[in-house]
Image: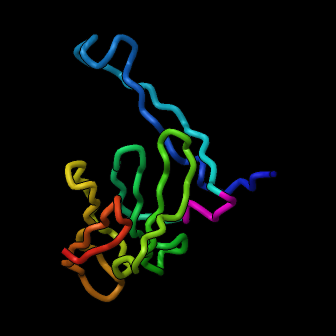
Amino acid sequence: AVERRVRGRGDVWGMSPPEGGWKASSRPEPRWERWECGAVAGEEVPTPRSNHAAAACGDHLLVFGGWSADGTTPLGHPELLHLGTRCWTHCSATNAAPPARGNPTLCYSAARHCAVAYAGWDGRERLGDAWCLDMEEWTWHRA
């Protein structure tokens, strides 16, 4: 199968500790490397977006919200980058995601295996709601 390259998919960078580790010098310089990323089953991911939120969730990077490539449409569908395989996929929750929004905040609780999305802007008003994505059940709950 031939994988179609999606513009922007290669714009993912990883940081490695400097030679000798972080404590080897008073001014350690990390090494940056561009990651080559693919998509699962030819999905059209990642969606080009700006002003989104991302959080490391165990072996995944969860991306939520943001604005479409043309900057006019808020986005609401989450996407996942598996950090081991460096493959993107849609985050398929069993219920509807929170309303679309740009400029949200996202954090992750490893103890609860839950990502929390908070606030943002939907193009008309500021949002002050909070939503939890249970990453074991793959369901969204309003917090």
Q: Would residue 132 appear left or right of 18 to someone viewing this image? A: left
Where in the figure is residue 7, as x and y percent of width and height? 65, 57
Our reading of the magenta stretch's main secondary structure is loop
- Residue in view at x 32 percent, y 16 percent: 21
User: Which of 129 and 84 lies nearest the eye of the viewer?
Assistant: 84
Q: Would residue 67 appear left or right of 22 to someone viewing this image? A: right
Where in the figure is residue 4, as x and y percent of width and height? 75, 56
Q: Which residues are magenta?
A: 41-47
User: Which of 73 and 100 lies nearest the eye of the viewer?
Assistant: 100
What residue occupies the far bottom of the structure in this picture? 124
- Image position of 10 with respect to 105: above or below: above
User: Which of 94 and 24 lies nearest the eye of the viewer?
Assistant: 94
- Image position of 143 with respect to 14: above or below: below
By what rule are the colours in the image chosen?
rainbow
Q: Would residue 111 appear left or right of 122 to someone viewing this image? A: left
What residue occupies the far right of the structure in this picture? 1
Quarter of the image holding residue 103?
A: bottom left
- Residue in view at x 24 percent, y 48 percent: 110
Q: Would residue 17 appear left or right of 43 to someone viewing this image? A: left
- Residue in view at x 26 percent, y 75 percent: 141
Where in the figure is residue 98, as x and y percent of width and height? 34, 78
- Residue in view at x 25 percent, y 72 percent: 131
